[in-house]
Amino acid sequence: MTVNRPQWQRTSSFNVWTRGREDALIRFTAPPKDAGNATLKVADSMWTYSPKIRRAVRLPKSMMSQEWAGSDFSYNDLARSDKLLAYYEHEIVEVVEADGLTTYTIESIPREDAPVVWGKEKLVFRSDNVLLEQTFFDQGMRAVKSMRAFEVQELGGRMLAKRMRMSDLEDPEKWTEIVYNAIEFDVEIDDRTFTQFALRSE
């Protein structure tokens, strides 16, 4: 992961284990000062762990919109699971055929009682299920940030975006890129992986 700011740039590495769309464990491996820092998501709950304080901290809902690990991704972005399906109404607004693939542009509007922060989201999908772009709009319908896919290729036997960039649309020099080096699917993962004990294991 590379975090870019006008005056500096920082790169870090981490491993991720996921189970479905609900559970995930993220553990940083580099640089040395960040190694061991971890985030655990189980259903709608999330915890962080720092080896420096040797304590797991559960994140309250009021902190979910804050930046995750100093990046342009928020804790809400990590915790989305199926919220886009559960709380939004969707409409296909554009269909484009190119290079043997169909690309769909979908506008997603949250229902009135939806517990979400965005006023609208716009997604661009290919017919092979690759997410090409996702734009987030505030309650005033102003585009705030956007995630774009680059270097689409086969990883772990599936077509995926190898590189994705989340950008602040008001500041082009503020962005975060995530690059997948290797992915494995359909791997048996012990249930204990998604526990606070595993979160604290360095």
Image: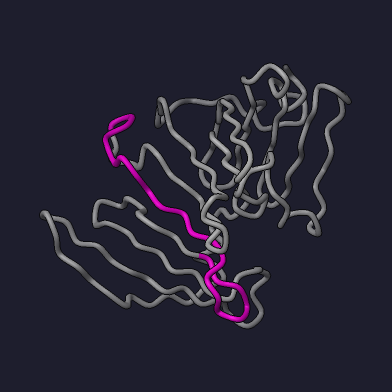
Relative depth, front residue between 68 and 125:
68
Relative depth, front residue between 186 and 27:
27
Rendered position, 17 above or below 96: above
Residue 153 within the segment the image draws in magenta:
yes
Residue 146 within the segment the image draws in magenta:
yes
Color style of the picture: one colour
Single out the residue that lies furthest toward the front: 7
Which residue is painted at 53% across and 74% down in the image? 120
* The N terminus, quarter of image: top right
Magenta segment, principal secondary structure?
A: strand
Rendered position, 160 above or below 201: below
40 relative position to 118: left or right: right
164 relative position to 190: left or right: left
Which stretch is magenta?
136-157
Rendered position, 172 above or below 116: above
* The C terminus, quarter of image: top right
- Give the percent coordinates (x, y) of residue 99: 11, 54
- Give the percent coordinates (x, y) of residue 79: 63, 51
47 relative position to 18: left or right: right
Which residue is painted at 71% across and 57% down in the image? 65
Which residue is painted at 76% across and 36% down in the image? 48
182 relative position to 146: left or right: left
User: So how many labels did they put on this image?
Assistant: 0
Quadrant of residue 11 within the rendered picture? top right
Quadrant of residue 41 within the rendered picture? top right
Rendered position, 79 above or below 33: below
Which residue is painted at 73% across and 53% down in the image? 66
Relative depth, front residue between 113 and 163:
163
- Give the percent coordinates (x, y) of residue 15: 56, 26
- Give the percent coordinates (x, y) of residue 154: 27, 34
